[in-house]
Image (cartoon, rainbow, N blue to C red):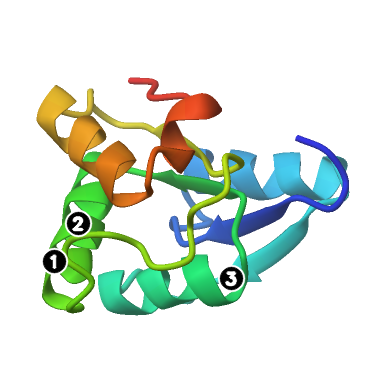
Amino acid sequence: MEPGERVLAALPLFHSFGASVLAGAVAHGATIVLQERFDAASALSLLERERITFFHGVPTMFELLMRAASSSGNGSRFSTVSRPCLSCSCGSRPLLSATSQHFEEASWGAARSRRNWSA
């Protein structure tokens, strides 16, 4: 992570995963876009409008984002998350390969180049 990166903080900040995402963003001088409570449609809008470069979530969040993208009328694609700088990490349990593949396709491959699908 570098200064100028943009992090969507939608994880609970009282949990170690959310707190570590926040601490890492602050330590690297990134811009933090807070979402008080995760809502997939709002998160999808924030990813695009705020030009988010880092998104950290749990598998359910990625699955809900895919549903929101499917119902947005964009043909299951994020409309402007098309640059190769969207980095994603997934915690709590492994992300199903079908979900990660669908997410990569929906982001026009942007999530592929710098992703970190961790378990």
Q: Judge by depth and name the residue closer to the eye, 79 or 64.
A: 79
Q: Position of residue 90 (x, y in %)?
A: 37, 34
The mark nearer the N terminus, 1 or 3, is 3
SS type, badge 2: helix
Q: Residue at x 46, y 62 (%)?
A: 10
Q: Is residue 59 visible?
A: yes
Q: Residue at x 17, y 78 (%)?
A: 73
The mark nearer the N terminus, 2 or 3, is 3
* Residue count near mark 3 (Cα–Cα under 10 Å), binned few <14, some 14–19, many ≥20: some
Check disc 2 and report the residue beneath it: 66
Check disc 3 and report the residue beneath it: 34
Residue 98 appears in which quarter of the rendering? top left
Q: CA distance from mark 1 to mark 3?
A: 24 Å
Residue 102 appears in which quarter of the rendering? top left
Q: Give the residue type that dot 3 points to.
A: Leu
Q: Give the residue type that dot 1 points to.
A: Ser
Left of 110 or right of it: where is 77? Answer: left
Q: Label 1 near label 2: C-beta < 8 Å?
A: yes
Is 102 located above or below residue 94 in the figure? Answer: below
Q: Give the residue type that dot 2 points to.
A: Met
SS type, badge 3: strand
| Quadrant housing the C terminus | top left
Is 59 located above or below residue 41 in the figure? Answer: above
Q: Label 3 near label 1: C-beta < 8 Å?
A: no
Q: Is residue 115 visible?
A: no
Left of 37 or right of it: where is 64? Answer: left
Q: Residue at x 44, y 55 (%)?
A: 11
Check disc 1 and report the residue beneath it: 70
Q: CA distance from mark 2 to mark 1?
A: 6 Å
Is 40 located above or below residue 63 in the figure? Answer: below
